[in-house]
Image (spheres, grey):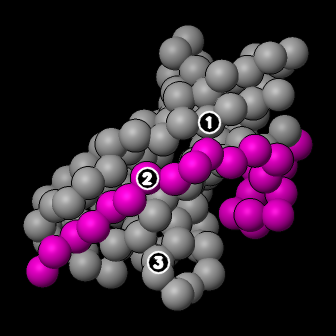
Amino acid sequence: QVQLVESGGGLVQAGGSLRLSCAASISGRTFSNYNMGWFRQAAGKERDFVAVIHRAGGLTFYADSVKGRFTISRDNAKNTVYLQMNSLKPEDTAIYYCAAARLYYSGDANQYNYWGQGTQVTVSS
């Protein structure tokens, strides 16, 4: 079983930065068994892929909309995945979710087994 808790969201002006964290509590397996992803959902829209990091940490993939501005990383010793968000834009406003996938390194939300409750990010213009 995996429980994920996001933190670090808030209100920021356009051009600013935020760092999201997602702490995992895991039983039966280790954090390094899971590929970890970040997704976001803006009001009235579907949940979109943001970034994914491989279980070993050496491989990452980003949505085109955030490439070059966001960086995903993980600390397996701390059971935590991060999303550093720079040069934020109003269109980045959304609830951000982290998710864990046992098998797949993927941008497809259907491949993820566990989800956090989300943290709100609001970017003002």
Residue type at numbered disc 2: Thr
Packing grade of label 2 (10 A; few <14, some 14-19, many >=20) is many
The mark that comes first in sequence, 2 or 3, is: 3
Q: Quadrant of residue 30?
A: top right
Residue for point 75% across, 57% down: 106
Locate the N terminus by quadrant.
top right
Tell me if residue 62 can be seen.
no
The mark that comes first in sequence, 2 or 1, is: 1
Check disc 2 and report the residue beneath it: 119
Residue for point 75% across, 44% down: 114
**Residue 64 horizontal/vertical position (percent):** 48, 75
Packing grade of label 3 (10 A; few <14, some 14-19, many >=20) is some
The mark that comes first in sequence, 1 or 3, is: 1
Locate the C terminus by quadrant.
bottom left
Segment tinted magenta in the rendering: 103-125
Which labelled disc corresponds to residue 42? 3
Q: Nearer the viewer, residue 84 or 21?
A: 21
Secondary structure found at label 1: strand
**Residue 92 horizontal/vertical position (percent):** 35, 72
Q: Nearer the viewer, residue 46 or 85?
A: 46
Which labelled disc corresponds to residue 4? 1
Secondary structure found at label 2: strand
Residue type at numbered disc 3: Ala
C-alpha separation, residue under disc 1 versus residue under disc 3: 20 Å
Horizontally, is 40 left or right of 91 in the view?
right
Contact between labelled residues 3 and 2, with CB atoms less than 8 Å apart: no
C-alpha separation, residue under disc 2 versus residue under disc 1: 11 Å
Whether 122 is among the magenta residues is yes
